Image (cartoon, coloured by chain):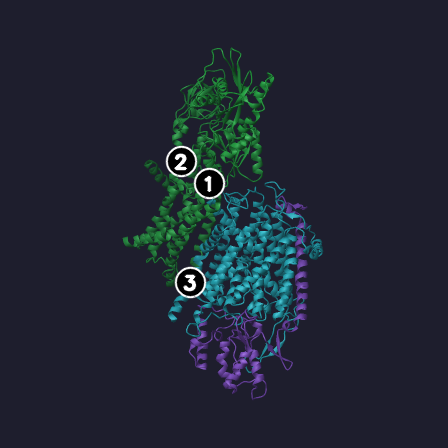
Amino acid sequence: MDVMLILALALLLAWPLRAYMVGIFSGQKHWSDKVFGPVENGIFKVLGVKASAGMNWKSYGIAFLISNLVLGVIAFLLLMFQHVLPMNPDGIGPLSWDLALHTAVSFLTNTNQQHYSGQAQLSYLSQGFVIVTLQFVTPAMGLAVCLAVLRGLMGGRNSAEAAEGEERDLGNYYQDTVRAVLRLMLPLAAVVALLLASQGVPSSYQASPTVPVLEQGQSLTEQKIPLGPVAAMVAIKQLGTNGGGWYGPNSSNPLENPTPVANAIETIALVLIPIAIVFMAGGLLRQRGFARMSLAVMGFLSLLCVGAAIYSEQQPNVAFTGLAQQTGNMEGKEVRLGTDLSALWATLTTQTSNGSVNAMHDSLNPVAGLVTRSGMLINAIWGGIGCGFVNFIVYVWIAVFIAGLMIGRTPEIFGRKLEKTEISWLGVLLVLPSAVILTFTAITVAIPSITGNSNPGLHGIAQVFYEYTSAFANNGSGFEGLGDNTQWWNISCVIVLLLGRYLPLVIPLVIAGLLAKKRQIPVSNGTLPLHNLTFGVTLVTVILILNFLSFLPSMVLGPIGEALELTSIAGDLK
Amino acid sequence: MNTTLIVHAGSESALSSHHAIWRPAAGLAAVMLVTCGLVYSGSVTGLAGLLFPQQATGSLVLVDGKAVGSALIAQPFSSDVYFHGRPSSVNTDPMSTGGSNLAPSNPALRDRVAAESAVLTERYQLAATELPIDLLASSGSGVDPHISPEAAALQLKRVAAARSIPSDLLNKLVEQQTEAPQWGIFGQPRVNVLLLNLALDKDFPLQQSGGSASAQ
Amino acid sequence: MSNALAQASVQAFVKLQPQLAIKSPVMLVVWMGTVLALGMTANSVINGKDYGFELASSLILFFTLWFANFAEAIAEARGRGQAASLKATRRDLTAQLLRESEEPIAVSASQLKAGDKVLVEAGQFVPADGEIVVGVATINESALTGESAPVLREAGTDHSGVIAGTKVLNGTITVMVTAEAGHSFLDKMISLVEGTNRQKTPNELALTVLLAALTLVFLIAVATLPAMAAFVGIELDLLMLIALVVCLIPTTIAGLLPAIGIAGMNRALAANVIAKSGKAVEVAGDIDTLLLDKTGTITFGDRQATAFFALPGVAQSELVRGAVLCSVQDPTPEGKSVVRLAQEQGAAAETLPDNAQFIPFSAQTRLSGVQLDNGEHWVKGAADAVKKWAQSRGLAVPNSLDPIVTKVAQQGATPLVVANQQRILGVIQLSDVIKPGVAERFAELRALGVRTIMVTGDNPITAGAIAAAAGVDDFVAEARPEDKLALIRREQALGRLVAMVGDGTNDAPALAQADVGLAMNSGTQAAKEAGNMVDLDSDPTKLLAVVEVGKQLLITRGALTTFSLANDVAKYFVIVPAVFAAAMPGIAALNFMQLPDPKMAVLSALIFNALIIPALIPLALKGVKIRAISAEKLLRNNMLIFGLGGVLLPFAAIKLIDVLLNWMF
């Protein structure tokens, strides 16, 4: 079965990738130094940083935030003034300020939520230069913060010589980011881009050719086949958990995802780095057991969701009852892919905070719709590059706090105590998703004039809920029917995007920085083991219950209610 | 490890050293715009164009040296002499691709499908529940170039009649044009409607001249 | 006890005051929900509408609050009860205050200040905690410890501390007061169990924060519902929403949290351990390393003669006679045990001639013995001391001596060599007798991840043998008092949390350095000040109990938190279908418990939510039973009982309540 093969290939490829990632991020000498060392040294000279100089959590966090601010301002200005800047052969006009702001922030936060309409509203400069750059840099920045958090968990790079309470070295932000782009993202993206081009993804700066259609005398007499440096962008769109495609309907468009093999490559690219990060964490933390447990937990939840989604899409779409063959739900799907590969993609893209689609999520059957939302709400099954594993660690912290008590010790992780300060920060992260997603959803649906829903009833709420969930989870997939290019949608999503990106990265960095300084208690019989089935099950329970408890009531007014409604409709139709 | 640790005692001192904070940030943005936006995009796109010139430029299908469409993009067909593709919510315009975005619960979807189903049951004299789903469900891109082999089989008799050719000959052509799952495992079996219709025109040319037919 | 219950019931009402309710964010939400529900009831009454559901809900919400308060009050009452029995002894004590060059004047104990000196004579009660500066006395501490055997307390020794309320049996002592009335250890302990002044412990605070965060999540989840419901034209019932919030927020653990903390202190107090802070008890659960003095903790402390080994060519009876002669007048337990062993082996009772001269043990000679009129001279002592003594008299040291001495030492026993003026006779084996059950205790601790380190002044060979027999993980031999401090620092540098027992003044720095320092009540004031717990029984093995009390406290907290959250799953499936029942008939599919009436279903969930608090009070007070198994098994067991059980139990219980309600009304 192609689904299993794709998943197996992704795992198989992630394993060697992990060794490479451990090599380039552990600070040891690595063969790739010979290839990239000179270029990197040149870059560090331009940046004026000493790459070997470590940073504590404050410096690291400030460097992360400031570099994002600078990049964001540049991106916003380039988008604002695309109509007067070069590389605009089609004479595409300016974006409104709020759309430019939303687009800049959306790509800056590794979300790639698109309120502009596909390729028609962006110039080549905006698309190929600004957006592609952000698609490379933002996952690298997320990965950098993840690396810092991991180093913090082990007491920092200077843990051997630093005293209790002394500031810890969490690495150099600029070195981490530059390496992630140069040594990881760029080579992988180049390979994937060429593979995709071989399958038919356009790769050209030529003007788009116009061809007459075969059967004349219809309302459409000719087609303009849109080209561009599409393969280059699609590669990093998939690899960097970005999701923002070249064409409107993303990878359902045959130009963006021409063949089932291209689809397999893109699906693997979608989860490759997120899976490799789990393996990598084991190597960097020197906690193989912990990595195995993480892999098992994520793998279990992922497969559970994949299974549910595939099953769901193999069921007929209720709207077709009695009107067509009672086979799988093909509304919004492509024939070459069928239901299974579409359901697989829908599940993985929402789990990894990627957000690219190869089928229309609006038209998914309710269970698959629930799966996609759960993937985004949990946001730690593989998750976005860097931020996914950081979110996972946040769940681990919460599980450790509760489970740790049950073994009769004040909770600790890797020998360091979770105390009130850390729990207070965790509390903020705990409240944040529901505070942001539910509050904005409630406000938006309370004022029907700003809602912009294309579907009535419960699915209308589901559309709004999905949009904010997707923004908060930095996913970027959307129910495309939503009329979302309005000032309200643009600005409210900007707020949600920023809250959903920076707090969930910076707060764990703070916690890791605080933990790193603490006394490390050696492992004993009385230590809570994080590598076994018992803790794995505990963690899965914590992840599920926390999200279930936070979002069940609103889900009843969304996908759950819809599913129940459909069940009764289906009953009536029969 | 021979590292020095930058430790800011408080954020004030950290922020006071503007130089140490803004310059790397600006430098990073500049370097990355050049590396990723220009060098990467340019070199990869150029290389792909060299290696795969046909695929890189939109997989255009040439007949007598003239482009008649893209193998990846569906074209609209409504005449009886052609096989028809899937419903498109964008009239198969590749510049404005997209799906219907109608939820299963949306009455608009049911209405659309009901209308289309009535047309097809009438046309093919079939119970509605035997209609292949892909002829009723609109595609995600709106330009899905394929239909299922069942959908092609359904249309076979109609096209054969319209072109006055034996069904089994046409059946052979359809079988030729049916693609198995790629590499034997990936994806679904499918028929590319544009390529099938082009082969149809080549093997069984229409009586009327002027290339494209319009039977109505 | 019924009196305590009545008291607690009243206290539970007192605690309803808003300024007290505000201390727990979770219960504050319930409090506000109750007020709101009461308001709605009143509104319905005024408007002449049916108010049954409103009134019932209000009452149940009120009882949820009251039960939570009751849990805290009953724990406090128990603690106070325990403390009061200790405190009773000190009421109306009078003190003979000594002023310089004046006769003692009688003052009330409550007027004493730290630094005052008081005279206490035989038959009088010690008026305040303090330290003996002059004199020696035997004291009955049974009022505090329940132990009736009197104890000896003496100025200038490691046993100079006295506690208020204990009775001097004989002797006259001058005591320097160290704690003013209201600031004694006992007072501190009492304040730890009394709600009003109780400081939350660090972990309790962290958990409170987590529970507050969860509460906020649920508030948001429910508060945003009406707007969403309105979008699809559904109007939700406010009271149902209040019920939903109250059932979801972790009321069970929040209601029991103070009781669990107080009960932990109570258990410490029940073990006659006075903790100076709740934190100390909590930290006890985390201890990685226990530093244990060999003497008194692992062994009985008095070494006993267990065998005589005569040298080749010496008659056993001669050795035994010599040993007895040396020991007849020896008042030490060792000496007495030699005589006892000789008698057990059938030796004739020796009486010393009248003018025999006993040579007591001294630190310089390190031997004791007897000199008789007839020139006979018998000594016993450490091997090297006796050898030196023999050599100084020109006696030969037989080659056969050392192997015997070594053999005895290797068995963890102490060899005492016996000699007379003519020759060396043989060896008495003094064994340190290990307390029964100690090895099992250590094995249990090891299973829980606690290492034990034995500290002893013995030589490494002796120490090693005892360590092996007692099953400690490590030992430090020939330890000087300052070695303890160094050892604690070393362990702490490795990240471990260390607990130790001490009584002497020179233990004070180590007690202060240790994460848990348990001072013996019999110890000096300095030791008691330095430690963060005091054991009234002065029983060093109490440290093991303290570790268990700490672990139990944390496990109970974690288990009930898990239980509380797990309960929510079932409550969701009761209330959510009820809330939407009218507007979304399809929701009945979620109502798989088949509760027929939405209002009854909500009331059933609320009743369960309220009743589970008193149902768990016994567990909160007693603590979850702790077993010596690995952390993983402990977690698995508790997850199964409190996690899985917490998911399943409410399904059954709520269904049962619902059936009852529907049958009654």
Cα gap from disc 3 to disc 1, whole angstroms: 45 Å
Do dots 2 and 1 share one subunit?
yes
Badge 2 vs badge 1, beta-carbon distance below 8 Å: no
Does residue C114 appear anywhere in the picture? no
> In the image shown, does C368 or B11 lie closer to the viewer?
C368
Query: Callout 2: residue from which chain?
Result: C
What chain is the cyan one?
A
Which hue belongs to chain B?
purple
What chain is the green one?
C
Q: How many neighbours does mark 3 have within 10 angstroms: few (below 14), some (14-19), or many (20 or more)?
A: many
> In the image shown, does C260 or C625 lie closer to the viewer?
C625
* Most distant residue in the front direction: C313
Query: Callout 3: residue from which chain?
Result: A
Residue B25 in the image, given as x and y percentages of width and height: 65, 54
- Name above or below for residue B1 compared with residue C334: below
Name the quadrant of the N terminus of chain C.
top left
Do dots 3 and 1 share one subunit?
no
Residue on which the image places disc 2: C79
> In the image shown, does A34 or C395 lie closer to the viewer?
C395
Badge 3 vs badge 1, beta-carbon distance below 8 Å: no
Residue on which the image places disc 1: C551
Residue on which the image places disc 3: A561
Label 3 secondary element: helix
Residue type at the position of mark 2: Gly
Does residue A5 appear anywhere in the picture? yes
Decide if residue C278 is on the left or right side of residue A252: left
